[in-house]
Image: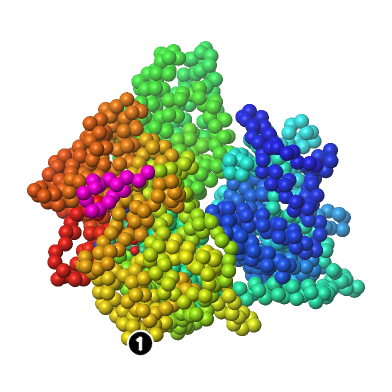
């Protein structure tokens, strides 16, 4: 069959819509599609069961392995969104491995990815909407059948999960040769035996007769019942087949009952809860896994129709139909259809009652339609086998029936393979009839291959003992470096993996055992961008936990409430009985007189019929009660309904509900026609409503509704009752879901109960619902028990928090993480360790590692070998362990993208303007960049600019190095690594983890930080190559004496060239130096434009940073990026990326007032804000409805007033309502800061924020932001007459409501000066109160 060259149109005949499947081209174009097409030539074989697999069990030819590996890895890396380099590197590795060993080892994440994809590609599976939720048990290291069995028990237990089924796959070692396959011989992990009797009849499941015989031949003996769980038959590369009986407690079975037919239970039908396919081959990236059992959960029809009612299976249809009293001798009464529905109802009902996950075919079909829609959007199609997807019953009333589908095969896949017992080399024992396993004969090559592969897995398994996960969040890369170091160290005794927080699958978190967090703090106590998502997920988990915690109390309350509702319903039951009885009497009386009225008769008859069923002896109402109740006085006293009905409280002076239903009082039926009769009923209802006044209103309403609907509604009741019977399971399901989603526990549960109560229409239904509610009650109680556990209670964790004590919220994010993890049940190994950038961050890290490693070893009972940590920290890269080799040149944008893990864009510089008048020595630039159409941003967002180091520093450093390579030839840095192998320690040269391949000059220009003062450890490295002993002593002193270091650093703030100049005997080798330098970080700038005013452009406002060190007497230092931009020629391309600042965006409502405080370059984002408002004003015909915009700007002198003219224009157009200018160094003007102006406008600021619900934005230096925060607090206290803590509370809520926004530029000039001032207190006073340099 030749695939069409274009997409295939697929119609939906229900909706009239059509889609185009293009995904099939991926299958068609794959040259690897070696399996035969399903429909050859002109004939459609759509209903053929066995889709051919690869057709052979011999290992795949190498080129096929590589072809499929490439396809899988391409898809895998595409989802990781990493540069193609990562793919290239990985694929090269795979190529090498395949060429040398014939196969390769998929990483665990690749394997999981492949398994999920195989499920996603399974054209016959209707439950694929769940494809992304699959748990992997990676058992590629097992060698024996016993290990396989243990792994399968773990799988079954995990997936069964007490009925709350979870999807999982266990993957055993891959195929190395056809004869050494690992196999699970069972088609499903759980199944019932089938025994053939001599007369040909079968006990048990006929489908398993053949396999049961295999089990018997291997020595297993079943009990011979209908429901014997078969043992697992397993074979490994060298062992087996062996059988293993499954422990009974592991196998969850559901005994079927029917919600309406009591006799159904006696049929003794049961089914297991876990559908786990174990006979298929998992084909993943060219590697075949013949043993890879996987499971989802049941769709009810699989059991109800196929397993139980297929004639070639349990064939229960006739038995059930007979039970239902149906005539089975004819087909025209549709007995088969009716019985089939009832069996399916029983399946759903029983599974739900026992709390075992099951999905009905209607829900599954709708979900599948949703899945197809998703897949169409995400992949351009969805392979689907219509024949299998349409459920085995009610086809055309499910939406899938009306949907055309395209059937094709994509890899990875789950494929059919020959049954293991058919390919196995048996040897028959002549006498016993039993079999033994023929000794498998292998060629040496096969053995070597199998042993080699297994040994690799085994070694990997040995090395990887307890899993440790290291998560980092970083803005400037330090946390990442520390995290990677930590991982190396933990890998000594644990199986440690490192992830950036935003790449970590949060769903895995509860399965972790040891979690180590390394995270910095950014903004003003915020998470680094790549930690935000993780933090939100934890936060969400915590919110649930809060509810769970509260739920321990709340659920008690819900449970109590349920009991009381049950009591009330019992009372209602009785009351309804009573009401029916009384009304019957009344209406029967009326019937006599009113029988001439057609219609009414019918309804009355119905009522009385209905009531006959419900008349029970439970309600005993004596004449005397009726008499007592006549008193109107008593009727107004409120009711004790229970006492009345039970008759226990006869003496209590209560009104009598049935007073009002007694026809004799108010109206004599004989005297009235139909209308009057209706009036009677109505009046009696109104009175009844009064008498229910002690009951919760919802019950009263429910009862009253019954009557208000009038008797003519009673007909409908019968129908509804039937519906309710069938709906009961669904209702219970809903309620269970509700209680499962315990975060909404109380309200939902109660409302579910209420919704059931609202269904209550008569005593019959009350009884049914009572049962139902009892079931709910037990669910709730179970949930109370389950929910007391905390999601991370099995995790041990520790946090290393990076920060800078210059900031008020020191290490806030690390502390926040620590707090959240503890709140979620995690057990702290150590209290948070803080790494202060201002003093000894690296030292703090080392100390933490030295503490946390033994603590983790102790917690997990792992042998503690902390001595190696010392060695690790002292083991340095030396000239003998680092080298350069020639390499391929990469594009700069590509290399930057890979190095920084960012999507790098290239923008042309259009224009550059100095915003200061020429008489100031400082520059602040407006840069206008052409951003093209692809870059999207909002006002307030940032760009990160990749700068390069100044040429004179780069050249100076290069001239001081010992270099053996050409400075302009691309090179790769390689490191000699020692790996522990089974053959001992093997040393190999490996590419450096991070340093990119490029020329040495490019490396120092674009990638490495050569201007930030070196850290102590780097000085220590330099000391090791200093030839002058005095220089060496001084370097070591700086490296080891913190106060000497701080003083030296803060005074000189030396860049690398200055250090090398200060220590002339130090001439490091280039290779050694580059491995010790940190990455040159991109610099952030707030976008100063609105995309609506300047489409396709990005504007930046950049203050050029120049300063003299040594208290203003040292050499001039040039800020790397600002000077790079200052010198940048228009027309050239800048490398950058956009970062969204969702905490600093304009309010959604345009009518709210906005106060913007941004001294110096803090004004940058506000230019974008006012431009945006202007665009909105133009679009909406004026500023009339738009909220007020106030700007507080500050600078030293009037000549530095940024965007002065633009602000005036904006003011004249009413875009900016007020602009305040604070001048701090203008001659003849008193020193004023933005804070002072805020105080002057205190009343208005208060009104805008507190009364009008405005938004407050602060942008710029951290110190200024802190001052403004204090100022606002003061305004709130003074204007709102608040205490300090009340004002703090208000600001806190403003932040929570996202009405107080801060955009912190970090420590800029003034803060740095303050630090220096602190270090050199005698240098005289500095002006540190202002804003950012402008
Ligand atoms: C989110 C965010 C948004 C930002 N938006 C803007 C913006 O819109 N406009 C803007 O101009 N900047 C902005 N910045 C600041 C910007 O990112 C850079 O920090 C700034 O341009 C300086 O970078 P540089 O490479 O020129 O200087 P660097 O080479 O990084 O040098 C600056 C460093 O030099 C040191 N230093 C500075 N002055 C002195 C001194 N007097 N004595 C001793 N040491 C000193 C300090 O350590 C300082 O951090 C923003 C920063 C952030 C984090
Ligand atoms: C713009 C900016 C804001 C910062 N805000 C804080 C802060 O609020 N609290 C803090 O302790 N450290 C703060 N820091 C300091 C960083 O946490 C510190 O530099 C850390 O070492 C960076 O680690 P990283 O490279 O892993 O991101 C800030 C640094 C910058 C540049």
Q: Quadrant of residue 1320?
A: bottom left
Q: Residue furthest bottom?
A: 1029
Location of the N terminus (image quadrant): top right
Which quarter is ligand 1 in? bottom left
Closer-to-camera residue (587/836): 836
x, y percent for residue 1329: 18, 56
x, y percent for residue 429: 88, 73
Mark 1 element type? helix
x, y percent for residue 1060: 36, 75
Depicted 797 relative to depicted 541: above or below: below
- At 51% from the left edge and 18% from the top edge, which residue is drawn? 600
Depicted 314 relative to depicted 1208: above or below: below
Q: Which residue is mark 1?
A: 1029
The magenta stretch spans residue 915: yes
Residue 550 appearing in the image: no
x, y percent for residue 316: 74, 46
- At 48% from the left edge and 35% from the top edge, which residue is drawn? 759
Name the magenta segment's main secondary structure. loop
Which residues are drawn in magenta?
911-925
Task: Judge left or right: residue 1273 versus residue 486.
Answer: left
């Amino acid at each position: 069959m030749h695939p069409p060259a274009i997409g295939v149109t697929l119609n939906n005949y229900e909706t009239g819509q059509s889609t185009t499947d293009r995904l099939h081209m991926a299958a068609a174009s794959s040259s690897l599609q070696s399996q035969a097409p399903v429909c050859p030539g002109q004939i459609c074989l759509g209903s053929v069961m066995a889709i051919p697999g690869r057709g052979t069990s011999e290992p795949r030819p190498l080129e096929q392995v590589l072809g499929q590996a490439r396809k899988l890895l391409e898809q895998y890396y595409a989802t990781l969104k990493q540069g193609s380099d990562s793919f290239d590197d990985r694929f090269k590795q795979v190529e090498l491995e395949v060429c040398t060993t014939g196969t390769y080892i998929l990483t665990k994440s690749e394997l999981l990815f492949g398994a999920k994809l195989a499920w996603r590609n399974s054209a016959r599976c209707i439950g694929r909407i769940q494809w992304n939720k699959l748990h992997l048990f990676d058992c590629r290291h097992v060698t024996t059948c016993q290990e396989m069995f243990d792994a399968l028990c773990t799988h079954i237990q995990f997936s069964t999960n007490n009925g709350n089924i979870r999807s999982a796959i266990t993957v055993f070692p891959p195929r190395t040769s056809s004869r050494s396959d690992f196999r699970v011989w069972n088609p499903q992990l759980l199944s019932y035996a089938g025994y053939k009797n001599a007369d040909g009849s079968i006990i048990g499941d006929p489908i398993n007769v053949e396999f049961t015989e295999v089990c018997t031949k291997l020595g297993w003996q079943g009990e011979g019942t209908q429901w014997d769980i078969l043992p697992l038959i397993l074979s490994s590369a060298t062992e087996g087949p062996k059988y293993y009986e499954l422990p009974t407690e592991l196998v969850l079975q559901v005994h079927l009952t029917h919600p309406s037919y009591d006799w159904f239970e006696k049929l003794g039908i049961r089914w297991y809860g876990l559908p786990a396919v174990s006979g298929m081959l998992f084909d993943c990236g060219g590697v075949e896994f013949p043993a890879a059992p996987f499971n989802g959960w049941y769709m009810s029809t699989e059991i109800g129709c196929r397993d139980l009612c297929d004639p070639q299976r349990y064939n229960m249809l006739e038995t059930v139909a007979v039970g239902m009293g149906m005539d089975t001798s004819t087909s025209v009464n549709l007995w088969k259809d009716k019985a089939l529905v009832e069996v399916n109802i029983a399946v759903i009902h029983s599974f739900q009652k026992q709390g075992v996950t099951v999905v009905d075919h209607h829900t599954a079909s709708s979900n599948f339609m949703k899945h197809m829609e998703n897949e169409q959007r995400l992949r351009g199609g969805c392979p689907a086998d219509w024949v299998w997807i349409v459920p085995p019953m009610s086809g055309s009333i499910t939406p899938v029936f009306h949907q055309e589908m395209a059937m094709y095969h994509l890899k990875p896949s789950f494929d059919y393979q020959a049954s293991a017992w058919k390919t196995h080399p048996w040897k028959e024992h002549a006498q016993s009839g039993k079999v033994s396993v023929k000794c498998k004969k292998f060629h040496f090559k096969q053995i070597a291959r199998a042993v080699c592969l297994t040994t690799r897995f085994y070694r990997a398994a040995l090395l990887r003992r307890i899993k440790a996960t290291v998560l980092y969040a970083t803005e400037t890369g330090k946390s990442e470096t520390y995290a990677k170091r930590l991982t190396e160290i933990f890998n000594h005794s644990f199986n440690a993996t490192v992830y950036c927080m935003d790449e970590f699958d949060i769903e895995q978190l509860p399965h972790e055992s040891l979690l180590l967090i390394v995270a910095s703090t950014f903004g003003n106590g915020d998470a680094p961008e790549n930690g935000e998502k993780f933090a939100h997920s934890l936060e969400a988990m915590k919110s649930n936990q809060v509810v769970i915690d509260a739920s321990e109390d709340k659920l008690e309350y819900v449970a109590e409430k349920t009991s009381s509702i049950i009591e009330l319903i019992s009372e209602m039951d009785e009351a309804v009985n009573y009401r029916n009885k009384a009304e019957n009497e009344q209406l029967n009386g009326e019937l006599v007189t009113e029988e001439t009225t057609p219609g009414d008769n019918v309804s009355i008859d119905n009522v009385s019929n209905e009531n006959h069923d419900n008349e029970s002896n439970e309600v005993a109402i004596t004449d005397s009660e009726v008499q007592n109740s006549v008193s109107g006085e008593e009727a107004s006293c409120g009711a004790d309904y229970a006492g009345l009905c039970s008759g226990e409280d006869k003496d209590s002076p209560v009104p009598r509900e049935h007073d009002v239903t007694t026809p004799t009082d108010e109206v004599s039926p004989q005297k009235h026609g139909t209308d009057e009769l209706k009036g009677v009923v109505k009046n009696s209802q109104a009175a009844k409503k009064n008498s229910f006044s002690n009951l919760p209103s919802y019950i009263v309403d429910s009862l009253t509704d019954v009557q208000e609907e009038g008797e003519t509604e009673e007909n409908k009741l019968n129908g509804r009752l039937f519906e309710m019977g069938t709906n009961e399971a669904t209702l219970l399901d809903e309620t269970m879901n509700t209680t499962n989603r315990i975060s909404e526990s109380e309200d939902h549960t109660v409302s579910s109960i209420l919704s059931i109560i609202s269904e209550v229409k008569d005593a019959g239904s009350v009884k049914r619902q009572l049962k139902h509610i009892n079931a709910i009650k037990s669910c709730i109680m179970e949930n109370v028990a389950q929910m007391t556990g905390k999601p991370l209670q099995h995790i041990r964790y520790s946090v290393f928090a990076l920060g800078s004590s210059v900031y008020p919220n020191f290490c806030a994010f690390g502390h926040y993480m620590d707090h959240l993890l503890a709140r979620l049940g995690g057990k702290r190994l150590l209290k948070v360790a803080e790494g202060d950038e201002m003093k000894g961050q690296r030292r703090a890290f080392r100390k933490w590692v030295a503490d946390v490693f033994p603590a983790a070893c102790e917690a997990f009972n792992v042998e503690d070998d902390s001595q190696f940590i010392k060695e690790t920290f002292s083991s340095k890269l030396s000239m003998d362990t680092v080298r350069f080799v020639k390499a391929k040149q990469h594009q700069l944008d590509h290399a930057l993208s890979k190095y920084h893990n960012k999507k790098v864009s290239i923008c042309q510089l259009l224009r550059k303007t100095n915003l200061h008048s020429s008489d100031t020595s400082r520059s602040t630039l407006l840069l206008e960049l052409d951003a093209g159409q692809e870059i999207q941003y909002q006002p307030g967002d940032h760009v990160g600019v990749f700068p390069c180091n100044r040429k004179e520093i780069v050249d100076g450093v290069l001239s001081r190095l010992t270099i053996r390579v050409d400075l302009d030839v691309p090179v790769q840095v390689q490191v000699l690594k020692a790996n522990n192998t089974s053959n001992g320690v093997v040393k190999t040269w490996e590419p450096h983890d991070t340093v990119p391949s490029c020329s040495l000059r490019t490396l120092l220009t674009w990638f490495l930080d050569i201007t930030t003062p070196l850290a102590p450890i780097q000085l220590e490295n330099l000391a090791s190559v200093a030839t002058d002993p005095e220089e060496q002593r001084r370097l070591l002193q700086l490296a080891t004496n913190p106060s000497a270091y701080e003083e030296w650093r803060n005074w000189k703030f030396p860049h690398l060239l200055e250090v090398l100049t200060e220590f002339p005997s130090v001439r490091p080798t280039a290779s050694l130096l580059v491995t010790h330098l940190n990455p040159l970080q991109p610099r952030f700038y707030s976008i100063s434009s609105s995309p609506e005013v300047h489409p396709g452009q990005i504007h930046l406002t950049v203050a050029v940073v120049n300063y003299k060190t040594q208290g203003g007497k040292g050499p001039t230092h040039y800020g790397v990026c600002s000077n790079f931009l200052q010198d940048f020629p228009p027309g050239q391309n800048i490398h950058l990326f956009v970062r969204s600042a969702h905490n600093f965006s304009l309010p959604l409502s345009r009518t709210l007032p906005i106060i913007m405080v941004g001294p110096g370059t803090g004004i940058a984002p506000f230019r974008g804000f006012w431009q945006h408002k202007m665009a909105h004003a133009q679009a909406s015909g004026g500023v009339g409805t738009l909220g007020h915009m106030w700007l507080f700007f500050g600078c030293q002198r009037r000549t530095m007033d940024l965007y002065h003219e633009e602000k005036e224009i904006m003011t004249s157009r009413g875009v900016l309502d007020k602009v305040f200018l604070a001048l701090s160094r203008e001659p003849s003007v008193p020193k004023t800061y933005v804070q002072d102006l805020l105080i002057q406008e205190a009343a208005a600021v208060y009104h805008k924020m507190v009364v009008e619900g405005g938004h407050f934005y602060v942008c710029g230096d951290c110190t200024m932001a802190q001052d403004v925060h204090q100022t606002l607090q003061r305004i709130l206290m003074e204007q709102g007459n608040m205490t300090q803590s009340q004002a703090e509370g208000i600001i806190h809520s403003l932040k929570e409501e996202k009405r107080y926004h801060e955009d912190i530029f970090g420590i800029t000039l003034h803060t740095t000066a303050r630090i220096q001032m602190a270090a050199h207190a005698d240098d005289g006073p500095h002006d540190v109160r202002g804003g950012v340099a402008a």
